[in-house]
């Protein structure tokens, strides 16, 4: 019998902020999106005030003032680093781990002889003790059931943040308490269809005939139902295939008209995207760059996109930046006020198995340069060195008026304790 645990960080972005700002504890907190536009994370206290996910800040200004809601701008460098720390703790204490998202990780506990509840409590305590991040732990025979166990563990005070459904007589009760839209893999369209047919809970779903499920939801839907019944259909090693594209884009804090400003912006995006695929050991064969005016303004509209083939598959920032700038120069037109830009890396492939070009080959010196570039930024913090003028302040950058320091990735932001 397989046994999985899902460890999920509680209100992750808010929890990261609270680690370094204890005064936020017990108070309503919201984290804002790029340009401080809307709430992308909320503490439980903020949720109780009625603040909704993705709600624009301007709609809740009075609520924020009246209840002294703590407002912070998203600090993704901090969140990414804190995520890595949480995952490392879990890797140290579990036989095998599989990160699912920035704040979720599956553990394979199959064959473990220790008491599962005690293990879950130990994992919860160690993650919080070593990183400061509170987590919930759900344990079950399948990943889908572990997801449900985790949801209940985090909501119910009786569980203490840990719920084990393996062989539990409470499994059906847990399924009955779970709305069908909260089942992993059930999207909005399936939810509407199921609700129309009287399927309101996860338990209702498990009671449907296999033939009907397969007809209405396909093979993937049938796997989900079987998982809810306790049959492991996903497996621990079922890792999604590497993605074929990656994109980095931003809306600007202010409109941009100057080509140099746009070059600076897309260079930043290309650098970020290149770092991302290097970490995943992927290479790209072509890039696309796009710019766009504000669709909500009465100004003239212009939203071009240009693709550029790379001379060879690469994850080298220098070559990617060069191609992106070339594409930008081809589509840039004077007289427009640009509000957004982005870079896409296309045709991604495994760096170890990509076919080599017979005519164009990378210079070994370039690889050494990028290795040194990455090493310096790892040691000194992101942005310690940059390509071109990417480290310089430019007007296009997103508004982040309430952003906390990068406590764990920037030397000058390390907290100072005075004894």
Image (spheres, rainbow, N blue to C red):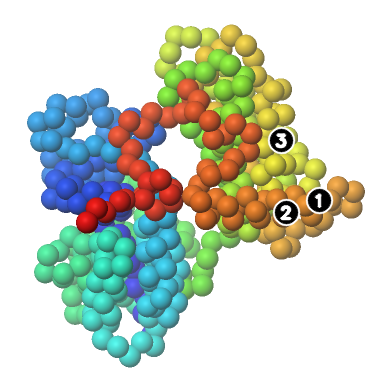
Q: Residue at x 23, y 80 (%)?
A: 117
Query: Is residue 222 shown to the viewer in this render?
Result: no
Q: Residue at x 69, y 48 (%)?
A: 316
Q: Residue at x 9, y 31 (%)?
A: 66
Residue at which label 3 appears: 322
**168 up-or-down from 321: above or below:** below
What is the secondary structure assignment of the residue under circle 1? loop
What is the secondary structure assignment of the residue under circle 2? helix
What is the secondary structure assignment of the residue under circle 3? helix
Mark 3 or 2: in front is 2
Residue 160: percent from left, percent from top: 16, 69
**Image side of residue 330 versus residue 251, left or right:** right
User: Could you tell me which quadrant the N terminus lies in?
Assistant: bottom left
**Alpha-carbon span between mark 1 and mark 2:** 7 Å
- Of pointers 3 and 2, the one earlier in the residue sequence: 3
- Tell me the quarter of the picture where residue 149 sits: bottom left
Residue at which label 2 appears: 367
**Image side of residue 244 versus residue 219, left or right:** right
Whether residues under marks 1 and 2 lie with C-beta atoms below 8 angstroms apart, the answer is: yes
Q: Residues within 10 Å of mark 1 (few under 14, many from 20)?
A: few
Q: How many marks?
A: 3
Q: Nearer the viewer, residue 370 or 354?
A: 370
- Of pointers 3 and 1, the one earlier in the residue sequence: 3
User: Could you tell me which quadrant the C terminus lies in?
Assistant: bottom left
Direction right: furthest residue: 359
Residue at which label 1 appears: 363
**Image side of residue 332 versus residue 409, left or right:** right
């Amino acid at each position: 019998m397989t046994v999985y645990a899902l460890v999920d960080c509680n209100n992750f972005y808010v929890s990261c902020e609270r680690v370094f700002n204890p005064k936020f504890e017990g108070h309503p907190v919201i984290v804002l999106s790029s340009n401080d536009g809307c709430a992308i994370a909320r503490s439980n206290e903020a949720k109780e005030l009625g603040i909704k996910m993705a709600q624009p800040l301007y709609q809740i200004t009075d609520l924020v003032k009246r209840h002294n809601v703590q407002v912070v701008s998203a600090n993704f460098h901090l969140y990414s680093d804190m995520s890595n720390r949480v995952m490392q703790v879990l890797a140290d204490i579990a036989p095998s781990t599989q990160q699912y998202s920035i704040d979720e990780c599956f553990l394979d506990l199959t064959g473990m002889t220790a008491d599962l509840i005690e293990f879950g409590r130990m994992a919860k305590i160690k993650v919080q003790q070593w990183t400061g991040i509170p987590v919930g732990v759900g344990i079950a025979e399948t990943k889908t059931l572990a997801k449900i166990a985790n949801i209940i563990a985090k909501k119910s005070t009786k569980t203490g943040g840990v719920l084990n459904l393996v062989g539990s007589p409470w499994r059906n009760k847990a399924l009955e308490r779970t709305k069908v839209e909260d089942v992993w893999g059930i999207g909005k369209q399936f939810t509407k269809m199921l609700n129309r047919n009287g399927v309101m809970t996860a338990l209702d779903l498990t009671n449907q005939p296999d033939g009907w499920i397969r007809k209405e939801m396909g093979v993937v839907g049938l796997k989900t139902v079987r998982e809810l019944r306790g049959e492991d259909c996903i497996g621990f090693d079922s890792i999604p295939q590497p993605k074929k594209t990656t994109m980095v884009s931003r809306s600007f804090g202010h409109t941009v008209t100057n080509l140099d400003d746009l070059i600076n912006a897309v260079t930043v995006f290309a650098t970020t995207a290149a770092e991302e695929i290097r970490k995943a050991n992927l290479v790209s064969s072509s890039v696309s760059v796009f710019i766009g005016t504000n669709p909500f303004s009465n100004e003239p509209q212009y939203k071009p996109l240009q693709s550029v083939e790379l001379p060879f598959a690469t994850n080298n920032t220098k070559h990617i930046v060069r191609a992106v700038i070339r594409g930008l120069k081809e589509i840039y037109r004077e007289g427009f006020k640009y509000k957004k830009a982005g870079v896409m890396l296309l045709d991604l492939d495994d760096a170890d198995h990509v076919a080599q070009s017979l005519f164009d080959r990378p210079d070994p010196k370039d690889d050494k340069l990028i290795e040194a570039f990455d090493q310096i930024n790892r040691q000194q913090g992101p942005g310690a060195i940059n390509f071109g003028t990417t480290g310089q302040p430019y007007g296009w950058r997103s508004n982040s008026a309430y952003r906390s320091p990068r406590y764990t990735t920037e030397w000058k932001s390390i907290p100072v304790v005075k004894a």
